[in-house]
Amino acid sequence: MEKIQRTLAMIKPDAVDRWPHIEKIIMDEGFTIVERRQVRLTRAEAEEFYAEHRDKAFFNDLIQYMTSGDVLALILAGEDAVVHWRTVLGPTRVSQAKEEAPESLRAQYGSPTNDSHNAAHGSDSITSAQREIKFFFPDLTLEPVLTGEGAKEYLSHAVSPTLVKALTELCKVRPDDPIVWLADWLLLNNPNKQQTQ
Ligand code: CMP
């Protein structure tokens, strides 16, 4: 059975300028980008995010690395997203990634001179994903991901009625650019938004 999950991806400071390439990988892998936020982490924030590594020898270098420039935090959604994104990343150490998974993101965009400057991060479990998503997007309320019957029911109650109306109008009007027309119609007629005169 399919498992639609959300995970937290973070593009690290030295890889942020490779965003167009990384975004293409993310899209090609079939993820949906639910949210994105570019932010410069303070030392305290980086220490909080990586608190589980506080006692490790590499902690100081890690914090310095993560505060050296903006990071790009992303919520990715997709089937088995936590494991899928970790697979796209490849092994943590850049040299190992190059050896074992040369097509992986860390092999391609990790630092050639510093093995632990590995271009991107991914949550290691659903629990970490929840914590890390909350860390970067504290005000976001995420509904549970619906699948199977729940998703069907949601579509038939919350999406289809409006979409059928929109498509019926579209057939009547026959606009030159149907996609733009449909987008505008949906914005104007969103039943969840208070209508203004
Ligand atoms: P990340 O997946 O963001 O999680 C912890 C980070 O610490 C890791 O990527 C690396 O950037 C860094 N790091 C440095 N040395 C190590 C190490 N020996 N093991 C794991 N992570 C390390």
Image: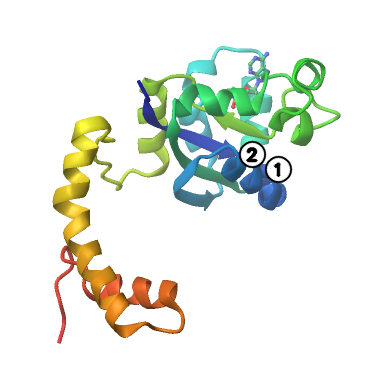
Between residue 32 and residue 166, name the one nearer to us. 166
Classify mark 2: helix, strand or loop. Answer: loop
Instruction: Report the amino acid beneath label 1.
Output: Ala
Locate ligand 1 by image quadrant.
top right
Mark identifier at residue 58: none
Image position of 142 (left or right of 56): left
Quadrant of the rendered structure where residue 118 is? top right
Q: Quadrant of the N terminus?
A: top left
Residue on which disc 1 sits: 15
Image position of 173 (left or right of 82): left
Above or below, 45 relative to 159: above
Task: Specify few, some or many for label 2: CA neighbours under 10 Å numbering under 14, 14-19, or 20 or more.
Answer: many
Instruction: Report the amino acid beneath label 2.
Output: Lys
Tell me, yes or no, if residue 1 can be seen here.
Answer: yes
Task: Specify few, some or many for label 1: CA neighbours under 10 Å numbering under 14, 14-19, or 20 or more.
Answer: many
Mark 2 vs ligand 1: CB under 8 Å? yes
Residue on which disc 2 sits: 12
Looking at this view, name the residue that lies furthest to the right: 113
Image position of 98 (left or right of 128): right
Between residue 1 and residue 50, name the one nearer to us. 1
Between residue 101 and residue 118, name the one nearer to us. 101
Q: Quadrant of the C terminus?
A: bottom left
Q: What is the spatial separation of the Cα atoms under label 1 and label 2, in whole angstroms?
A: 6 Å
Q: Badges 1 and 2: C-beta atoms under 8 Å apart?
A: yes
Quadrant of the rendered structure where residue 10 is? top right
